[in-house]
Image (tube, rainbow, N blue to C red):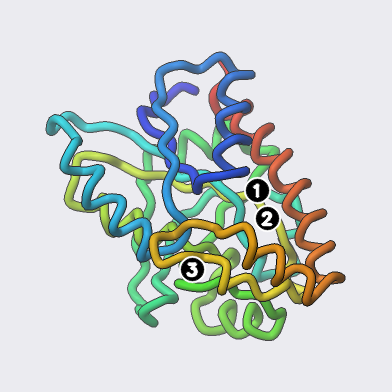
Amino acid sequence: MPLQIDFVFVPQGAEYRSVYKGLQIAGYNAATVVPIPVGPQGVTQFLQKWLQLFPGKTSLNALLMGLGGSLTPQLSVGDGVIYQTCVDGAQGGDVPMTCDQQIFLSLSQRLSETVIPATGVSCDRIIHTATEKRQLAQTYQADVVDMEGFALLSGLKSTPISLGIVRVMSDDVHHDLPDLNGAISPEGRLQTLPMAMGMLRQPLPALRLIRGSLKGLKQLEQITTQIFKP
């Protein structure tokens, strides 16, 4: 990685494990991998505490990495993107936040054959129907939906930490997912039992989600290695 990355923020759980493994394969030890909660509320609460421990005013570089949902037929399961901008879909804001340009350019050169530039929109719940996805894409002119990007960009904007965002698609724009919103606690933790019950209620969408997540996680690991390998 030509540009040094000091922190890698990743949603806790399987995404964290994939990124951590990718870093190990690359042999990159200069970055601290930071597990974060799921969703904007959890991220905001986490950052308030985490930034209190942040020592100095030195300029540092960070990445947010994880899975995302495609809002366009041009992005299929397993495809990777680098955000140029991210919009707040939770509060209905129409002013996008821009990711760090230097990090964006460095990643674009590094991953030119693997990922494409994109606009993200962050929501405060899982967007689980294809109809909602199409509406989001139309409203915000976005390519990808996530739950943490805007909150992290917003929380770091007055700090010396510059942020880039890389996402890998775990679901496409054409199919519904199981509604797992009841499985996310207010603190942004995935709760196992409600998640299992939600999947049992919608077995076919659940199977599609599992397959897509496994493919996305494998690609997330590979892209992490590609970013950080010497």
Query: Which callout, 2 or 1, points at the residue further toward the start of the chain?
Result: 1
Read off the residue under disc 2: 169
Identified by mark 3, the residue type is Val
Q: Secondary structure at mark 1?
A: strand
Q: Is residue 152 above or below residue 57?
A: below
Identified by mark 2, the residue type is Met
Q: What residue do we see at 56% from left, 59% from top?
A: 191
Query: Which callout, 2 or 3, points at the residue further toward the start of the chain?
Result: 3
Q: Secondary structure at mark 3?
A: strand
Q: How far apart, in angstroms, are the residues tagged by discs 2 and 3?
A: 14 Å
Q: Is residue 8 above or below residue 148?
A: above
Relative side of 229 to 8, left or right: right
Identified by mark 1, the residue type is Gly
Q: Position of residue 222 (x, y in %)?
A: 68, 32
* Number of residues whose C-alpha sits closer than 10 Å to that of mark 1, classed few (under 14), some (14–19) or many (20 or more): many
Which disc, if any, is residue 121? 3
Q: How far apart, in angstroms, are the residues tagged by discs 2 and 1?
A: 6 Å
Which disc, if any, is residue 80? 1
Q: Position of residue 85 (x, y in %)?
A: 43, 60
* Number of residues whose C-alpha sits closer than 10 Å to that of mark 2, classed few (under 14), some (14–19) or many (20 or more): many
Q: Secondary structure at mark 2?
A: strand
